[in-house]
Image (cartoon, helix red, strand yellow):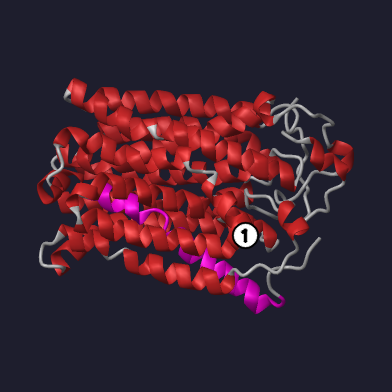
């Protein structure tokens, strides 16, 4: 195996700091807009009928541009590729609000930049032998960025003298700072051969490396023909669909309950803040078989119950119900990332499964904001929308159930004796 990216703990610490800052930058472009969806048409002249499309574009970009990150990393290096993606994100955040006619194209470009960076973050974690805590801190960074984006948009708007464009454009600054830090921290020193063995799904500890050779399932069947791979991809995609549907429309729903725009934006931020501990701990707990048996199928059921609770709760109870929904939804994201590693035979398989899960998953997730918005428009209320999302959550429970059953997903190259990057104590077949 090639050398680590950095020699010395302080350098690994710098990499971790850079990864967390990068992760924080990969959600505000979405949640800032979600928190002020009712103001977008007035501020930028966008046709109200295009609001569902505005919420869908970033996730649609996730689904169709996932291959850009690995392609760019092969040419300029992983750290430089992430830095470029963050610079493009900064430009997109500025362009979409300074030139109103480019609001939709700029939002799509922002989604492309976010996807380019996000698929490479787990690869850097794996290359640096990051533990499950590394993965947890990165997933928590996503939630923190989402919370900051939603919670600060109204105060920033007031600080900029009522300028919504200024409140949205200011997020280009941390994106630029993240680009500088990850470029300085992320210059790879590993050999090309080592880079090829890096898994792109993150994780570590109990869930961070290949299964023992005796447990490897000898197969040359492509991942797209393996049931476990599809179950993991479905779990990742369904939890992402729910997340983006919720973050796109929760603030609008809460205003229909009688809350002010500022209160609704604050609760959207609370949705992300409440889930931060869960997003940190879920990847760590997922390495424990007894917990995973309950967690994988159980999360979908909990999300369904929480959605119904938010729908039925009066305005005075929304703080508690939105908090519960944030906890279970964020745990689902952390578990989705962890399953990619736990249910794959080794680093190369984890990388392939990660690409499959994120590509398919985000394409599926792009339907969430659009479908939720259309259901609300067609019915004039929120009952049908929330019941449909709860039904999706029950399907998520089924995907989690099948994701932990049967043989792990793998590709033939993992059978050739890939050198482990981290220790693995997870059995390849949790339930027979």
Please tell me whether residue 31 belongs to the stretch shown in magenta: yes
Q: In which quarter of the image is residue 212?
A: top right
Q: In which quarter of the image is residue 364?
A: top left
User: Which stretch did the figure color magenta?
Assistant: 7-35
Q: Which residue is at a point 32% across and 27% down the rendered structure image?
A: 371
Q: Which residue is at a point 76% across and 32% down the rendered structure image?
A: 429
Residue 90: % across, % down: 35, 62
Magenta stretch, main secondary structure class = helix
Q: Quadrant of the N terminus?
A: bottom right
Q: In which quarter of the image is residue 325?
A: top left
Q: Name the residue under label 1.
A: 124
Q: How crowded is mark 1: few (under 14 residues within 10 Å), some or many (20 or more)?
A: many
Residue 270: % across, % down: 32, 53
- In the image, residue 338 sits, relative to residue 277, either above or below, namely above
177 and 229: which is toward the camera: 177
Q: How many labels does the image show?
A: 1
Residue 32: % across, % down: 28, 53
The answer to whether one can see residue 264 in this image is no
The answer to whether one can see residue 309 in this image is yes
Does residue 221 appear to the left or right of 34 in the view shown? right
- In the image, residue 118 sits, relative to residue 426, either above or below, namely below
Residue 16: % across, % down: 57, 67
Does residue 365 appear to the left or right of 13 in the view shown? left
Q: Quadrant of the C terminus?
A: top right
378 and 403: which is toward the camera: 378
Q: Which residue is at a point 61% across and 28% down the rendered structure image?
A: 230
Residue that lies at the very extreme toward the front in this rendered image = 75
Q: Is label 1 in a helix, a strand or a loop?
A: helix
71 and 416: which is toward the camera: 71
């Amino acid at each position: 195996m090639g050398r680590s990216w950095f020699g010395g703990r302080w350098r690994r610490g710098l990499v971790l700091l850079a990864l967390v800052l990068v992760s924080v930058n990969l959600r505000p472009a979405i949640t800032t807009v979600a928190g002020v969806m009712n103001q977008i048409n007035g501020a930028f002249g966008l046709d109200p009928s295009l609001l569902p499309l505005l919420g869908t574009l970033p996730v649609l970009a996730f689904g169709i541009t996932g291959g850009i990150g690995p392609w760019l990393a092969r040419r300029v290096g992983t750290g430089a590729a992430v830095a470029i993606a963050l610079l493009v994100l900064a430009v997109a955040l500025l362009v979409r609000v300074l030139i109103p006619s480019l609001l939709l194209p700029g939002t799509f470009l922002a989604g492309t930049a976010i996807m380019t960076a996000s698929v490479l973050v787990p690869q850097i974690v794996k290359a640096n032998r990051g533990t499950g805590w590394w993965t947890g801190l990165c997933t928590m960074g996503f939630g923190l960025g989402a919370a900051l984006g939603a919670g600060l948009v109204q105060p920033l708007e007031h600080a900029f003298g009522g300028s919504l464009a200024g409140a949205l454009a200011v997020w280009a600054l941390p994106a630029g700072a993240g680009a500088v830090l990850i470029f300085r921290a992320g210059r790879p020193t590993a050999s090309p051969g080592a880079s090829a063995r890096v898994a792109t799904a993150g994780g570590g500890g109990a869930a961070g490396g290949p299964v023992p050779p005796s447990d490897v399932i000898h197969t040359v069947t492509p991942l797209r023909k393996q049931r476990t791979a599809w179950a993991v991809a479905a779990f990742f995609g369904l939890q992402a669909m729910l997340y983006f549907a919720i973050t796109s429309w929760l603030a609008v729903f809460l205003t229909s309950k009688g809350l002010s725009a500022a209160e609704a934006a604050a609760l959207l931020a609370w949705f992300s803040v409440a889930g931060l501990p869960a997003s940190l701990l879920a990847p760590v707990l997922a390495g424990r078989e007894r917990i995973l048996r309950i967690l994988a199928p159980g999360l979908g059921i909990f999300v369904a119950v929480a959605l119904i609770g938010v729908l039925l709760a009066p305005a005075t109870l929304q703080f508690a119900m939105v908090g519960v929904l944030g906890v279970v939804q964020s745990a689902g994201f952390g578990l989705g990332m962890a399953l990619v590693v736990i249910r794959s035979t080794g680093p190369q398989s984890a990388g392939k499964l990660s690409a499959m899960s994120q590509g398919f998953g985000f394409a599926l997730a792009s339907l969430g904001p659009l479908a939720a918005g259309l259901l609300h428009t067609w019915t004039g209320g929120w009952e049908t929308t929330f019941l449909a999302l709860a039904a999706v959550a029950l399907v998520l429970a089924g995907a989690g159930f099948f994701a932990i059953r049967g043989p792990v997903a793998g590709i033939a190259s993992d059978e050739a004796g890939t050198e482990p990057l981290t220790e693995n104590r997870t059995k390849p077949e949790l339930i027979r």
